[in-house]
Image (tube, helix red, strand yellow):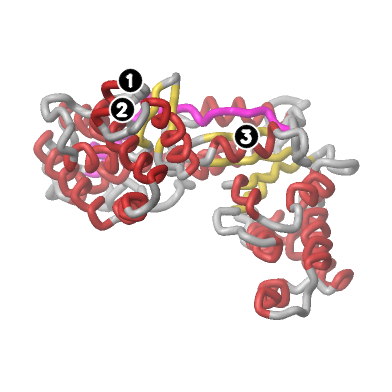
Amino acid sequence: MSALNPFIWDRPLDDPSKIVGMEAFANEVALTLKGQTNVALFGPRDTGKTTFTNQLALELAKKQGTDAPPFDAVKVNLQRVVSIPGFIGCVHDAMTSHPVKSVRRAAQRQIGVLEKEIGFDIKVIKGSVKSALVSPAQDAETLHAQLLAVRSLSEHLVVVFDEFQRLRHCPGDPLAIIRSALMSSGANHVSLVFTGSIRNALKMMLENSEQPIFGEAAQMQLPAISRIDFLEYLDFQFEQTGKPADEDALNHLLNATRAHPRSTQQLAWECWSGTPARKPVTLDTVIEAHDRLVQTIERSEFASVLNVLMSGDEGEVNEVRALQLLADRGGENVTSRPVATRYGFSSHSRVRPALERLQGRGLVDHRDGTWYVVDPLFSEWLRRASPLADRSAPEASLD
């Protein structure tokens, strides 16, 4: 029996025993990639895309038939990329820190070849931000050569570009470089995964005929984790660590978080931490832990974003109104004239554009035609602070 808190919420999961409800979808995506079809994967921020790619790497490593041998996966995190030198740094990190020894050593050999052939030196590339020693053309050539090196790491390879939509603001035509290196002659053994938390931005990169990767990927939505899968996972983890959870406690925990992956793990962590050893997790435990977490939003990035929007122009203030409307009333009938007027919109036609801008910020999304605030703790904080919320009604759920 473990005395350690089993719930992880502050980083992506890589332990297969702690990844919930991803197996079937990972198998589907793995077979798609092994069939030489690229995949673009959508999912709001903090809903488990990076954790899914860890599960996907495990699935890719399996032999799924004579025509679906094991594949290696290289994951490139683009979350902070704003330039070609930054892109080069991210690819270098993905190569040198690969978890599989054989791939990591192959990467180290390829980097050695690059250093000899084109004078590749990551320290020089990173330092070039402050100097004029390296031209943009040289950076583009280096990135292209580097991606060619990546494709030589394995006979069966998947390259994952996490938060791919960040490249839309990167000068130097990185999409054309990717296409030339990883989607052209000689790259038939390579499939690509593009993940994105800003759906519209990623779709623009895939559906605009002027973009280099136009029409080059099957678009897939990261599925929601089923309630029963999460319920069984939470029940098992609490039980195995000597703090069994009441059924009412588990149900309230999932209702409060709408089974949102990060928030569910975070609330479970808080409940576990607040329960003495060998004592049960009760409904009161969950209610108190939830209240503590909602109160922390006051000092979070969400509150900072809200303050910036409130100080902005009419369009930005409309985004605040739209957030409040969703938190108070749910995401159906969002363009109702009486509702829009109640929340201060000059016209009901301004609600949807505000929601679309919020979606671009990763704060809201929609599933099955219903809009919702992505982070359930943020949504509850908004609802509690609203003078227009119905106190007798629980927060709208996607279940």
Instruction: Identify the magenta region.
Output: 216-241
Q: Please state the horizontal and vertical placement of residue 375, each as a whole percent of the image.
A: 34, 40
Provide residue 16's location: percent of width, then percent of height.
47, 40
Of callouts 3 and 2, the N-terminal one: 3
Q: Mark 2 points at which residue?
A: 340
Element type at mark 3:
helix
Q: Distance between the residues labelled 3 and 1?
A: 28 Å
Q: What element carries label 2?
A: helix
Q: Is 152 covered by the magenta stretch? A: no
List x then y, in percent, for residue 13: 45, 46
- Number of the front mark, 3 or 2: 2
Q: Image quarter for residue 114?
A: bottom right
Relative horizontal placement of residue 316, taking residue 385 as reference (left or right): right
Q: Which residue is located at x 23 percent, y 53 percent?
A: 298
Q: Tell me whether circle 1 and circle 2 mark residues in contact (CB < 8 Å).
A: yes
Q: Mark 1 points at which residue?
A: 336
**Neighbourhood count class around disc 1 (C-alpha, 10 Å): few under 14, some 14–19, many 20 upward:** some
First of labels 3, 1 by sequence position: 3
Write down the quadrant of residue 215 in the picture.
top right
In the displayed structure, 76 sits above or below 321; it is below
Which residue has dot 3 on it?
Answer: 203
Three-letter code, disc 1: Ser
